[in-house]
Image (cartoon, grey):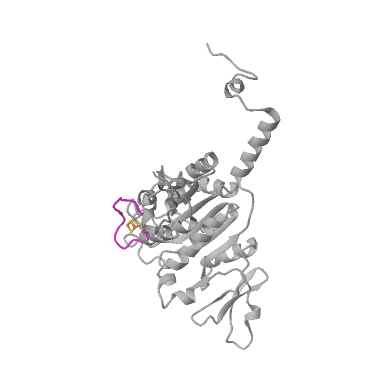
Amino acid sequence: MESDTLQNGTHVKLSAKDFSSDQDVRWCPGCGDYSILAQVQRVMPSFEIPREKTVFVAGIGCSSRFPYYMNTYGFHGIHGRAAAIASGLKIARTDLDVWVATGDGDLLSIGGNHFIHILRRNINTVIMLFNNRIYGLTKGQYSPTSEHGKITKSSPFGTVDTPFNPLTLALGAGGSFVARTMDRDPKHMQDVVSKAHKHKGTSFIEIFQNCNIYNDGAYELYTEKDTKPENTINLEHGKPLLFGKDKNKGIKLDGFRPVIISLDDGIHTVNDVIVHDHTSKELAMILAQFSEIKGFPVPLGVLYEVERPCFEDEMEEQIEDSTRKKGAGDLEKLLFSGTTWEVK
Ligand code: SF4
């Protein structure tokens, strides 16, 4: 691949089109994945990172076809292992810009273990979870995010599983950047993806994605014009947590318990409303659980963002330090040092 930044000795500016590959996109017509692909391609040029330095890693599932459609390097791995492959790649090649495109089955079921470990290690990557709450590629079985009681082909009487909340899971595992957006809000998605990319560490984005074939309307309440204002809350650091069509409802904290208040009741004012602070893990945990409390709006935007050391940086420093003190290593010598056995 020819360098993006320097072509024939001159710098070139890339466009969204430059990030689109020549592959036919094979998602079902109307799938939310199209919007995610379009938004990512739109923001990529603003990062000014050459395509040959960019890698999209995927596991298995509808969302995992993503690397084929990006005109960058890509890795279509095996089921659930995208986070593990991305971890290894970033540690071995810290100069690369590493992304993960994954689904709720891929990341949270078979890939659950790799997911929590990339988060606690804080490896500098962006993980995009296409959460459609169903297994789409294998034709409609319930996934780790399908709601309790969901009737699917693999749960004809309703699932008795309790679903994962991807946001509380990511926060609990030590995620340093945790956000949510949705396929039906292109501008919001572009903003969240850009912020995630800017963050140094593992950036996790849950994307509400409609699978119009096997789980159509899963997020209707949050995406439709008439129900969205009452059922979603947009998070902005330093701004009060207001929602509703006229922004006349707010969130107040009664101890650790969130309460919805009305600014029209003659009792409360905007001063009673909590101000979003994305550096507070306590607040992020409370917000992340809104989707589990009946009547509460689901938060969209950046719930949590803090700086903390990345695994690969500390590892590099350790190697440099040891080399300085002890000289370059010799693998052959190491293998035959200490106690060895000869098997005859
Ligand atoms: Fe999209 Fe669902 Fe079709 Fe998969 S099965 S491509 S998630 S609409």
Observer able to see residue 136: yes
Q: Residue furthest front?
A: 9
In this picture, residue 325 sits left or right of residue 74: right
Which of 258 and 63 lies nearest the eye of the viewer? 63
Q: Could you tell whether 177 is left or right of 208 in the image?
A: right
Q: Which contiguous range is marked in magenta?
A: 20-33
* Count of numbered circles in the view: 0
- Residue situated furthest right in the rendering: 325
Q: Is residue 25 magenta?
A: yes
Residue visible at 37% across and 67% down in the picture: 217
Q: Is residue 279 above or below residue 77?
A: below
Looking at the picture, tell me which residue is in the foreground, 108 or 334.
334
* 246 inside magenta stretch: no
Residue 288 appears anywhere in the view? no
Residue 333 horizontal/vertical position (percent): 61, 20
State the residue in front, 124 or 293.
Answer: 124
Q: Quadrant of the N terminus?
A: top left
x%, y% of residue 86? 49, 44
Location of residue 99 in the rendering, given as x and y in whole percent from the top left corner: 47, 50
**Residue at the bottom extreme, as displayed:** 266
> Looking at the image, which residue is at 53% across and 60% down?
195
Q: Magenta part mainly helix, strand or loop?
A: loop
- Residue 64 higher or lower than 40, as above or below: above
- 5 or 305: nearer the eye? 5
Residue 228 picture quarter: bottom left
